[in-house]
Image (spheres, rainbow, N blue to C red):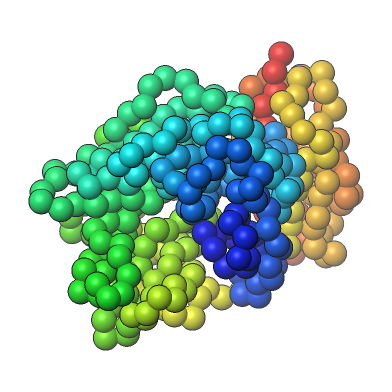
Amino acid sequence: AYPTGGGTSEPGFCAWSSPDLREWKPEGMILKLADVSWANGDPWAPDIIQRNGLFYFYFCSGSAIGVAVSDNPVGPFHDALCKPLIPYEEDMSSIDPKAFIDDDGQAYLYWGATFDGRLFMRKLNSDMISFSGEKKTIYEFDAHAYYHCEGAFIFKRAGLYYFMWSEYNWTTLPNLEEDNSYRVNFAIASSPEGPFKRVESRVPILSTDMARKIIGPGHNSVFQISGTDTFIIAYHYHHGDEIRFAALDTLQFGSDGLLWTLNPSETGVPPVPLSCGLTLDGTGPFTHEDAISFKAAYPSVAHKLRLVVNGEIVMEGSPSPLLNWNNASSGFKRVKLEAVNGSGSVAVSVPLDIDINN
């Protein structure tokens, strides 16, 4: 987990890790703003994504977005460009990045915070630190006298793309009456480039519950439990003071694929132990002549491992902590490990995204 704050008084970003989504430990600072030459504002709203064995950490400083890189999810990270990826905007619209890689390997960056209902998108190249094409307004609500939106997020499920954002007033005390309006909304599309359709009968999906003092919930992210159709939403809220709490809850979908309104649990999600993992032994991009090595972690009861690439099994055999994949064809590959035990149950790793060039 990569919060805006919580762990140090020095300007920068920290990480927290968990083996089961219940017990959490601090991993310390992963990026100091003192090491970012162009940074001239408070740090907030980071996002992280993996490709070719590297981790790309998108972050804000003031109203500008940067990108840092590391071969370890807990850093240390270094500024990849020594300049903003998205330059400073006086209207504070260059904040809240969200990176997304689709199944075909095309990457996108979504961002924005505006008072007229606009959020933005631009295609990323496979290096994850440069753009192709032009900036696009990905969502535009019919603005009225006051419509603030921020915190863009996108995920994919069963062929649908869910675009989420937080809206209305994010202020803290003493403006509690206004802060009640902060909430999470969503729209859907059949493409990551939209057009996104807002489903009025199902929105917002997360909003203030004054009776329970769950106030101003918002700026969410979503992740999938590997090998399942379970999607977890992470968000923050407060009880009417300056302290904000991080929360996890399970998203619910209707038979039509649309999200149901979420009733915050305040207890989190049940433990989800990590039982299967896959990491690259090295970094890419690779060529089709390379032998690509992976480090595998799996349950002791596993009697068979499968390497699955773009939905097809490319390797299958006895458990081993080191796997080598040879003669891979060129293109974008989404790779996961499946560990099968004697009863046939399967543990699945978080997928890795890899580029293989000619």
**Residue occupying the far bottom of the picture:** 211
User: Where 208 falls versus 345 (above or below)?
Assistant: below
Give the x, y percent position of residue 90: 33, 39
Give the x, y percent position of residue 20: 65, 69
| Residue 316 visible in the picture | yes
Quarter holding residue 325: top right
Placement of the N terminus among the 4 image quadrants: bottom right
Tell me what residue is drawn at x 60 percent, y 65 percent: 9
Q: 314 or 328: which is nearer to us?
A: 328
Give the x, y percent position of residue 2: 58, 57
User: Where 14 falls versus 112 (above or below)?
Assistant: below
Tell me what residue is drawn at x 61 percent, y 30 percent: 81
User: Where 288 falls versus 340 (above or below)?
Assistant: above
Q: 41 or 267: which is nearer to us?
A: 41
Q: Is residue 218 left or right of residue 248?
A: left
Q: 10 or 287: which is nearer to us?
A: 10
Q: Is residue 330 left or right of residue 189?
A: right
User: Where 36 falls versus 170 (above or below)?
Assistant: above
**How many numbered marks appear?**
0
| Residue 231 visible in the picture | no
Tell me what residue is drawn at x 57 percent, y 67 percent: 6
Q: Is residue 292 left or right of residue 137?
A: right
Give the x, y percent position of residue 41: 48, 49
Tell me what residue is drawn at x 72 percent, y 49 percent: 75
Placement of the C terminus among the 4 image quadrants: top right
**Residue occupying the far left of the picture:** 145
Q: 104 or 9: which is nearer to us?
A: 9
